[in-house]
Amino acid sequence: MTRFLVRRLGLLALVVWGVVTATFALVHATPGDPARATLGDKAPESAVQALRAEWGLDQPLGVQYWHFLTDLVSGNLGTSFQYRSPITALLAERLPTTLLLMLMAVTFAVVISLPLATWVAVRGRGGSDIGVRIFGAVAQGTPTFLIGTLLVIVFGLKLHWFPVGGYGRTTAEHLHSLVLPAMTVALGIVPMLVNSLRASLTDALQSDFVAFGHSKGLKPATVLAAYAIRNGSISGVTILGIQAGVLAGGALVVEKVFAIPGMGSLMLAGILGRDFPVVQATTLVFAGIVVVVYLITDLSYALLDPRARLT
Amino acid sequence: MRGATVGQPLLKVEGLCVDVSIQGGEYAALKDVSFTVQRAEAHGLVGESGSGKSLALRSLMGLLPSNARVSAGSAYFNGTDLFANNGRNFRKIRGTGMSMVFQEPAVALNPIARVGTQITDGIAQRKGWSRKQAREYAVHMMQLVGIPHPELRVDAYPFQLSGGMRQRVMIAASVACEPELILCDEPTTALDVTVQAQVLALFDGLRTELNAGILYVTHDLAVVSELCSTISVLYAGQLVESGSAAEVLGNPREEYTRALLAATPRIDEPGQRLRSIPGTTPALRDRPADYSFAMRMADHAPDSLSIPEEH
Ligand SMILES: Nc1ncnc2c1ncn2[C@@H]1O[C@H](COP(=O)(O)OP(=O)(O)O)[C@@H](O)[C@H]1O
Ligand SMILES: [Mg+2]
């Protein structure tokens, strides 16, 4: 288990370094001068040059990269050009929102997918199976923002069950505001999750070990839960891991659609304002989130399947 | 005696027919099969691979694969009609009345549950046992089936045990509720000869100690002659011959039984020449409605292999 962890953590560090470097390169290759963007078109060139010097943008790229990396390692993410405040403070404000959004999205996805997949697998081939497949194909082909817009129209504008945007001030308001965005992200991964769960549950239901469970006279519900679902849902964990990127990307888009002040909207604001440090830091954090989700699913896999603990 | 009515057989199967649907077509896998098993008696159901032995056992447990069904016939366990009441009678009988030892413990044991749990989950649910009680009983049962150091293995997972130990776990799980009838599906095929002999002795002990009936499925006549007092010979879904073991094995009436015997190594006659039966049992879809063993022999008769004459 320790070796398992060390190996995964090593991989994590490597991935994060790769992402950070790629972001640095991309940000500096994008046309547009942050100092000019901050001061406006009418500012004198000398003021712009002064600001560039202050931010270290006049130094060679290699030197900038070195400063960027050493700062990162010491936990200093820099200062936002736009907000003129340390990025760690900005993140502390926004990261919990995005994490909560993603957590709710995963919960919704699982709560929708597992019963649906179980129902279809138990009923076997037939109408429900085909229905779910068609639904899956359609849902998978629909972009997140479209699903989000549809949810807003139905549950926000027509039914007034949930706010159509904003984040509120109390925790209850936060949770309430996040329902539609989280559902939007969830529906993005539900089709794939249902499909994979349906397939593995069907396999499990036809397996000898489920027959064996019945042969011992166990209650059918016990066999379903302890034998079929426990085995069949292992694949679902893997799918959640694979979909970690989709999850993070979905959160990013959805925060914009629903005006949620999280990491996604911070990142977009950073890109639009040529706010290099913000873009770099938010990318880093998103990459970190994806990698950590991978790690968590890997660990849950090992917890669910004793055979995986050996490798 | 438990639930016994004088003169009534423990299991009475009459005219059992099982159909399997393959790609839209229905094929008869068992045709008009009848036999009885008495209390404290071991009955052998013998036939080559593909003769329908596993389907016969599964139909008696109500655990046929989803594409197979009982199309005719009846089966009475202690006078209870197994196929009546829409399958609900099975639920009362599985575990305490009948249990089944599956052919492949490697796939019939739940891969992600501890072996101790799998031995006792049936009886623990029935009796409302605590975890501790169940664990103690699991250790006791493991001892009974000859697993050394059960207290060290009770928490193991199936993949951590050898094939022989897994099969013993399977047997322990099947007899945990002290069933009146044990269905065995080639339980020793995967085991080496010494372990096989131990497992056979174990079944014989259960038969005399629990007064249990045993329906023992195998392709191995040597095993049958050791354990069973009566046998039925099955070929391609049809009952070829049945009677007392001494009678059928000592003086076989049917050509198929004689061929099976000639292909079985004999312990009392080492070094004798074995004549394997030419060909194999044809697949379900390749059997004509009136298929018989004579047709297979005709297909493989020496003259049918001769080179066509030249003109
Ligand atoms: N679920 C199934 N679908 C299709 N064919 C099957 C199925 N189960 C069994 N059969 C076929 O039925 C015949 C009898 O199978 P089985 O009962 O497993 O034989 P045995 O246990 O004697 O080897 C074989 O030809 C097998 O291929
Ligand atoms: Mg078989």
Image (spheres, coloured by chain):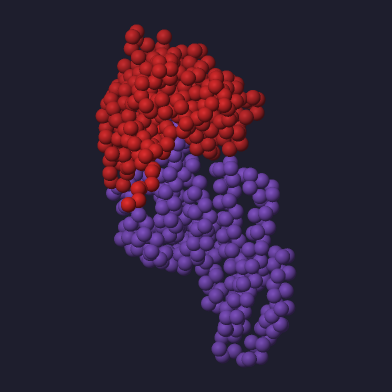
Q: Quadrant of residue B231?
A: top left
Q: Residue at x 57, y 83 (%)?
A: A31
Residues B248 and A262: in front is B248
Residue B25 seen by the camera: yes
Residues B34 and B177: in front is B34
Q: Residue at x 47, y 60 (%)?
A: A168
Q: Quadrant of residue B39?
A: top left
Q: State left or right for residue A246 relative to residue B16.
A: right
> Residue A183, image x and y in percent?
42, 57
| Numbered label tally | 0
Q: Residue at x 60, y 61 (%)?
A: A288
Residue that protrudes farthest toward the top in the picture: B6
Q: Quadrant of residue B90?
A: top left
> Residue A99, image x and y in percent?
54, 57
Residue A39 seen by the camera: no
Q: Residue at x 53, y 64 (%)?
A: A262
Residues A18 and B82: in front is B82
> Residue B263, image x and y in percent?
47, 29
Q: Is residue B201 above or below residue A224?
A: above
> Residue A270, image x and y in percent?
56, 74
Chain B shade in the render = red
Q: Is residue A72 above or below residue B94?
A: below
Q: Is residue A70 above or below residue A307?
A: below
Q: Is residue B116 above or below residue B308?
A: above
Chain A shade in the render = purple
Residues A64 and A118: in front is A118
